[in-house]
Image (cartoon, rainbow, N blue to C red):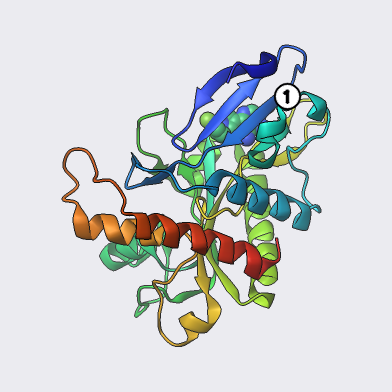
């Protein structure tokens, strides 16, 4: 997109970042319909995914208005009309190189690490927990944002202190835990469990304020479960791309190019994203 003077600055797996010469200090985050799993972008995309996830993220930013975030309307008239439903105009921040992961439940890489060491990112946990169990309290498990192409690396809180200094490290942890507590309470009233999520923060160059950035609480950055199904013991029916992951792990060795997603998987995934939005009322 060089449309209307927007200049492409960066491609993520599923999103694109643009700047505009007439909007200094602003960026446009554009969500595509691409889907990624196990570090690969898959074919085909999920029709409408970019718009659904943008809607979810914008809704959460509004729910979380007690915390400063990077959204702005300043320059909105320059956003191409065909991108308004899958883009967010944001203030450019000085980003912290830390992914602020919060986990309320034991799942994924957290479950793997727990089985090996009874810890998650160096945090000791009680014995006897099972995959999908709720943790005694949500834990903050930061990761270092590796340069593009490399894997993010789980780090201890002490390592975060070395990376960003003690004050910022503490501020990132407490903001992450506060936002997670608020978001899980909101989700719970709608029959949805927020199992874990990842936040990113930056510093506002003008105010110096710690500011919530990136996408928030989307199905790409979070694990969401159906509370009723969870109560029955079913812990795999998530509102994220678990459908894609499950299909891929049953149909691909992990070597070479991943297979094309079948139509049903694409449709089911799109339907789950839409259902999450409906449940939350976003
Ligand atoms: C920023 N990303 C990740 C997001 C991509 C890559 N407000 C901000 N200020 C400065 N930098 C960023 C943000 C935000 N958000 C975010 N990289 C830089 C990213 C979307 C698409 F390609």
Residue lying farthest to the front in this orientation: 263
Residue occupying the point 73% across, 37% down: 70
Q: Position of residue 222 (x, y in %)?
A: 52, 56
Q: Position of residue 20 (x, y in %)?
A: 70, 17
Q: Is residue 198 left or right of residue 212?
A: left
Q: Which residue is mark 1?
A: 26
Residue occupying the point 66% across, 33% down: 83
Q: Which quadrant of the structure image shows residue 50? A: top right
Q: Which quadrant of the structure image shows residue 177? A: bottom right
Q: Is residue 154 left or right of residue 177?
A: left
Of residue 133 and residue 114, the one placed in the foreground of this image is 133
Q: Position of residue 7 (x, y in %)?
A: 61, 16
Q: Quadrant of the C terminus?
A: bottom right
Secondary element type, mark 1? strand
Residue occupying the point 71% across, 66% down: 281
Q: Which quadrant of the structure image shows residue 266? A: bottom left
Tell me if residue 96 can be seen. Answer: no
Would you call the spot at circle 1 few (<14 residues within 10 Å), some (14-19), or many (20 or more)?
Answer: many
Of residue 57 and residue 275, the one placed in the foreground of this image is 275
Q: Quadrant of ligand 1?
A: top right
Q: Position of residue 35 (x, y in %)?
A: 42, 45
Residue occupying the point 24% across, 57% down: 249
Of residue 201 and residue 232, the one placed in the foreground of this image is 232
Residue at mark 1: C-beta within 8 A of ligand 1: no
Q: Quadrant of the N terminus?
A: top right
Above or below, 125 against 42 in this view is below
Q: Is residue 19 left or right of residue 148?
A: right
Tell me if residue 8 can be seen. Answer: yes
Q: In this figure, what is the number of numbered marks?
A: 1
């Amino acid at each position: 997109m060089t449309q209307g003077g927007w200049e492409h600055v960066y491609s993520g797996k599923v999103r694109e970042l643009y700047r505009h010469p007439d909007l200094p200090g602003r960026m446009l985050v554009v969500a595509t319909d691409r889907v990624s799993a196990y570090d690969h972008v898959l074919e085909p995309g999920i029709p409408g995914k970019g718009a659904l996830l943008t809607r979810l993220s914008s809704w959460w930013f509004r729910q979380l208005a007690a915390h400063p975030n990077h959204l702005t309307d300043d320059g909105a008239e320059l956003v191409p009309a065909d991108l308004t439903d899958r883009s967010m105009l944001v203030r450019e921040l000085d980003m912290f190189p830390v992914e602020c992961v919060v986990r309320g439940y034991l799942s994924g890489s957290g479950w793997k690490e727990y089985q090996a060491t009874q810890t998650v990112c160096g945090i000791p946990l009680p014995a006897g927990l099972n995959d999908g169990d709720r943790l005694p309290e949500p834990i903050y498990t930061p990761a270092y944002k590796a340069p593009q192409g490399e894997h993010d690396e789980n780090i201890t809180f002490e390592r975060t202190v070395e990376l960003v200094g003690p004050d910022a490290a503490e501020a990132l942890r407490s903001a992450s835990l506060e936002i997670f507590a608020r978001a899980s309470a909101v989700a719970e009233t709608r029959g949805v469990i927020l199992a874990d999520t990842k936040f990113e923060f930056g510093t506002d160059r003008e105010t110096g304020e710690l500011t919530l950035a990136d996408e928030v609480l989307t199905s790409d950055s979070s694990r969401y479960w159906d509370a009723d199904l969870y109560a029955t013991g079913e812990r795999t029916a998530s509102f994220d791309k678990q459908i894609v992951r499950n299909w891929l792990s049953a149909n691909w060795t992990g070597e070479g190019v991943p297979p094309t997603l079948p139509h049903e998987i694409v449709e089911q995934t799109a339907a789950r994203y839409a259902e999450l939005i409906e449940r939350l009322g976003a």
